[in-house]
Image (tube, rainbow, N blue to C red):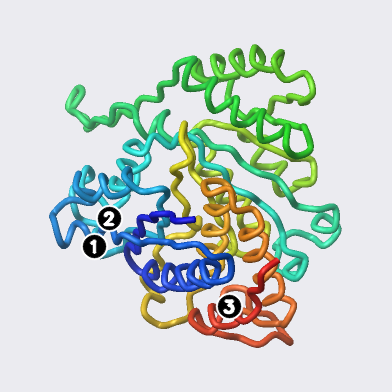
C-alpha cells in the first residue's frame, strides 16, 4: 500500500522527535510491504522565519493533498513578540480549519511500567487510568471574534464563544461512537449553570442520546470534571467537550499518566485524512540536545496507521515495541526513575526499532 504523508517537523524539539517517528514508519513499511512517501511542510516559527507567515496557503495545500499529516511541535520564545495573528500557534489553528478536522481524540492511559511516575496516589492509580477525551477542535472561543478596544477610556478585551447545533451534534456523535467501541459510557462536560453555549450543548447531547440507547450518557460541569480527573479517573471512559475546556482537561489528564511526552493524539473530520501529533510543546530549552522523548510522536504515527490507513496490525506492532522498550528499563529524562537506564532521543528510537517485529 502506498500512502502520502505530509510531515511538519516544526520548531524546537519537533525535528528530533519527528525523525524518530519516520524511522519507525520506514521500518513498518519494510516489514509489511508498504510505501510511505513524505512531503515536508513548513509551519509555525520556521515558516514565519522563511515566509513571514505561520502557514502559507502553499504549505496548507500540501497537507490537504496528503493522505494524512504528522506534526512535531510548533512555537517558542523566539516568536513571542510577533503580532497575535502571526503567532506560530495561529498556523496550527489554520491547519485544523483548513483540513476540516473538528474532533481531537486524546487518550489518557497509564502504561503499567510507568505507574510509579504518576503524581497520583498508588491507591488511585491501581484503580486504572484508561479514558479518552474527545475535544471539539475548530469552534468555540478560539475561533470566535477577538478584539481589544477602548471603552470609557479603558482597554477592554472581548473573546466570543459560539457554537451552533450542527457543530455540537457532529462532535457529539464522535463521542457516542467512540464510547460504543469502548466501555459504552460517555460523560458530556460543559458549564451549563453559567453559559448559554453550554446549555445548548447539553440539550443537543441529550437529544443525541436517544440514538445511542446502548451508551450511558452523564453530564458533568467542567470545574467538577477537573477535580474528578485527579480524584477518581477510573470513573471515566469517554469524555466529550468543547474546544477550550478540552484543551485544559486533556493537558491535566495527560499529566496523571506520568509524562506528557508519552501521549499521542489524533484529529479527524469527515475524511480519513487526519492530523497526528504528540500533545507536548516544542520545548526550546532542550532542543538539539538529544534528550527529548519521541514516544508521543511515535505513538501518534501508530494512531495514523490505525485510524487513517486501516493498518491495525502495524499500529499494534509499534505499540508493542514501545511496551517492550519500557520493559527493558530504558527511559528518557522526563520519565527517568531509580533503577532505570537513561537514554537520549535517538537512542530511544534505536531501541524501539530493535523491538519492532511483524505481528
Q: Residue at x 32, y 43 (%)?
A: 64
Identify the element where label 2 is drawn: loop
Query: How many residues crowd around disc 1 within 10 Å: few (fewer than 14), some, or many (20 or more)?
Result: many
Whether residue 339 is visible: yes
Residue carrying label 1: 46
* Above/below status of 29 relative to 192: below
* Above/below status of 184 relative to 13: above
Q: Residue at x 55, y 56 (%)?
A: 264
251 displayed left or right of 269: right
Q: Residue at x 70, y 70 (%)?
A: 323
Q: Position of residue 48 (x, y in %)?
A: 19, 57
Q: Quadrant of the C terminus?
A: bottom right
152 displayed left or right of 197: left
Q: Position of residue 222 (x, y in %)?
A: 61, 33
Q: Nearer the viewer, mark 1 or mark 3?
A: 3
318 displayed left or right of 92: right
Residue carrying label 3: 353
Q: Position of residue 56 (x, y in %)?
A: 19, 48
Amino acid at each position: 500500500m502506498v500512502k502520502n504523508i505530509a510531515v511538519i517537523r516544526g520548531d524546537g524539539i519537533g525535528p528530533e522527535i519527528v525523525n524518530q517517528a519516520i524511522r519507525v514508519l520506514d521500518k513498518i513499511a519494510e516489514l509489511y510491504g508498504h510505501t510511505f512517501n513524505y512531503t515536508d511542510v513548513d509551519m509555525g516559527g520556521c515558516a514565519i522565519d522563511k515566509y513571514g507567515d505561520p502557514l502559507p496557503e502553499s504549505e496548507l495545500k500540501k497537507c490537504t493533498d496528503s493522505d494524512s499529516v504528522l506534526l512535531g511541535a510548533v512555537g517558542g520564545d523566539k516568536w513571542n513578540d510577533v503580532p497575535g495573528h502571526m503567532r506560530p500557534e495561529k498556523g496550527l489553528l489554520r491547519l485544523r480549519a483548513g483540513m476540516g478536522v473538528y474532533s481531537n481524540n486524546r487518550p489518557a492511559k497509564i502504561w503499567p511500567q510507568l505507574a510509579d511516575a504518576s503524581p497520583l496516589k498508588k491507591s488511585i492509580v491501581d484503580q486504572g487510568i484508561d479514558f479518552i477525551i474527545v475535544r471539539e477542535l475548530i469552534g468555540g472561543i478560539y475561533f470566535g471574534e477577538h478584539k481589544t478596544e477602548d471603552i470609557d477610556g479603558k482597554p477592554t478585551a472581548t473573546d466570543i464563544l459560539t457554537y451552533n447545533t450542527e457543530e455540537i451534534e457532529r462532535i457529539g456523535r464522535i463521542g457516542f461512537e467512540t464510547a460504543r467501541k469502548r466501555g459504552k459510557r460517555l460523560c458530556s462536560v460543559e458549564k451549563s449553570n453559567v453559559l448559554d453555549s453550554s446549555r445548548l450543548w447539553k440539550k443537543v447531547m441529550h437529544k443525541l442520546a436517544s440514538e445511542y440507547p446502548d451508551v450511558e450518557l452523564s453530564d458533568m460541569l467542567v470545574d467538577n470534571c477537573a477535580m474528578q480527573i485527579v480524584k477518581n479517573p477510573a470513573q471515566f471512559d469517554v469524555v466529550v467537550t468543547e474546544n477550550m475546556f478540552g484543551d485544559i482537561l486533556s493537558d491535566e489528564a495527560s499529566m496523571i499518566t506520568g509524562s506528557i511526552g508519552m501521549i499521542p493524539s489524533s484529529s479527524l473530520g469527515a475524511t480519513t485524512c487526519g492530523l497526528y501529533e504528540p500533545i507536548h510543546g516544542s520545548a526550546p530549552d532542550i532542543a538539539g540536545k538529544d534528550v527529548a522523548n519521541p514516544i508521543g510522536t511515535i505513538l501518534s504515527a501508530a494512531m495514523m496507521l490505525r485510524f487513517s490507513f486501516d493498518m491495525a496490525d502495524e499500529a499494534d506492532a509499534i505499540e508493542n515495541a514501545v511496551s517492550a522498550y519500557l520493559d527493558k528499563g530504558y527511559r528518557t529524562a522526563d520519565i527517568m526513575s531509580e533503577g532505570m537506564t537513561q537514554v537520549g532521543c535517538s537512542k530511544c528510537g534505536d531501541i524501539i526499532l530493535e523491538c519492532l517485529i511483524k505481528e
